[in-house]
Image (cartoon, helix red, strand yellow):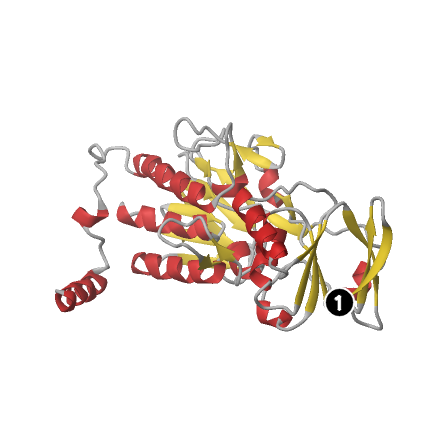
Amino acid sequence: MIKTDILIIGAGPVGLFTVFEAGLLKLRCHIIDALPMPGGQLAEIYPKKPIYDIPGYPSVLAGDLITNLEKQIAPFEPNYTLGDRAETIEKLEDGTFIVTTKSGIKHHAPVVAIAGGLGSFEPRKPPIAEIKDYEDKGVAYFVREPEVYRDKKIIIAGGGDSALDWSIFLADVAKEVTLVHRRTEFRGALDSVEKVKELVDAGKITLLTNSEVKHIKGNNKVESVVVKHKTEGEKEIEVDAFLPLFGLSPKLGPIGNWGLEIEKNAIKVDNATDYRTNIDGIFAIGDVNTYPGKLKLILCGFHEATIMVQSAYKIINPNAKRLVMKYTTVSGITGFDGVKKEQKKAVTKKI
């Protein structure tokens, strides 16, 4: 039986940051994740994807963000159960919980924080009959290593943030980048749309709207694709790789059977208080939750984790005096003595 103060389900960026906020309040954390390493989708699916909306970072690669989060929480010594999925939950008479994983490991905690991102996920695949024959032979639903496409001719399909962001990034890597979208309007960030248009005008991206990839051709690997325009018919384009980036199809998995209130494959929470679910002691933070005005952004998940931990402290320490939140610049961080010394050295040298 593994015992902890806060049991976190999900080792993505929001789950990891929860450890930091809990650590400031001297709360212990244990994290469960079905993936074999911390980082969630950022580490598993797109570690080299640049992220632009993390405060203090004009741009940071997803994998680097996870590395930095791990360094940030290291002084609080979190424990992990990785490569194992949370299957069942039992609420005991004293209000605490036992969560059992698929392999049978039991975890006991007074607070459970579900930070499972989109849950278990599968890529949304376009309806191309032969696409399975070319998976890992030029067809990829995620970009794990951009250098694979160095000096290659690639075609990207999609109209959301992933398709736009990778078109922009790979414009400086690939020999040719063609972006295909079945509409003229995009669902991604306006800034990304404008950047794509600039690259189109500069001749670094070819944009085909009102179009869809209908067929893939090649001898045991992708050699060309057939693109159909709504009014102009079909044309064949020679390519080395085809990236249909239509996002993920999320599934809550076993968590959906825990008696939580679910809405559109997400866990309903009370955002007017602390992101609590309909079961006292269970919270949901990050992309896995839903409430009026919800934005699925990492930085919003960080905020939710911060608020949630304050309430978790009160559950774990019901007889404690009123919790007074202090700025870390004033209170310091236990376990960061070495870091603080290095900072002092740096400041001394600068002066």
Residue 21 seen by the camera: yes
Vertical arrangement, residue 143 with respect to residue 181, above or below: below
Vertical arrangement, residue 40 with respect to residue 259, above or below: below
Compare residues 156 and 305 and report the one nearer the observer: 156
Q: Locate residue 50, reporting x and y percent.
A: 50, 58
Q: Residue furthest right?
A: 233
Compare residues 326 and 19 and report the one nearer the observer: 326
Vertical arrangement, residue 155 with respect to residue 328, above or below: below
User: What residue is drawn where x is 63% and y is 50%?
Assistant: 121
- Residue type, numbered disc 1: Val
Left or right: where does residue 27 sit relative to residue 14?
A: left
Quadrant (top left/top right/bottom left/bottom right) for the C terminus = bottom left
Residue 28 seen by the camera: no
Vertical arrangement, residue 63 with respect to residue 287, above or below: below
Left or right: where does residue 61 sit relative to residue 209?
A: left
Q: Locate residue 245, reporting x and y percent.
A: 67, 53
Residue at mark 1:
239
User: What residue is drawn where x is 64% and y is 73%?
Assistant: 151
Q: Residues within 10 Å of mark 1 (few under 14, many from 20)?
A: many
User: What residue is drawn where x is 50% and y is 62%?
Assistant: 37
Compare residues 255 and 274 and report the one nearer the observer: 274
Left or right: where does residue 272 sit relative to residue 153?
A: left
Secondary structure under badge 1?
loop
Left or right: where does residue 178 sit relative to residue 85?
A: right
How many numbered marks does the figure carry?
1
The image quadrant that residue 239 belongs to is: bottom right
Q: Locate residue 129, reporting x and y percent.
A: 85, 55
The image quadrant that residue 96 belongs to is: top left
Q: Locate residue 183, reporting x and y percent.
A: 72, 42
User: What residue is drawn where x is 42% and y is 44%?
Assistant: 299
Compare residues 228 and 13 and report the one nearer the observer: 228
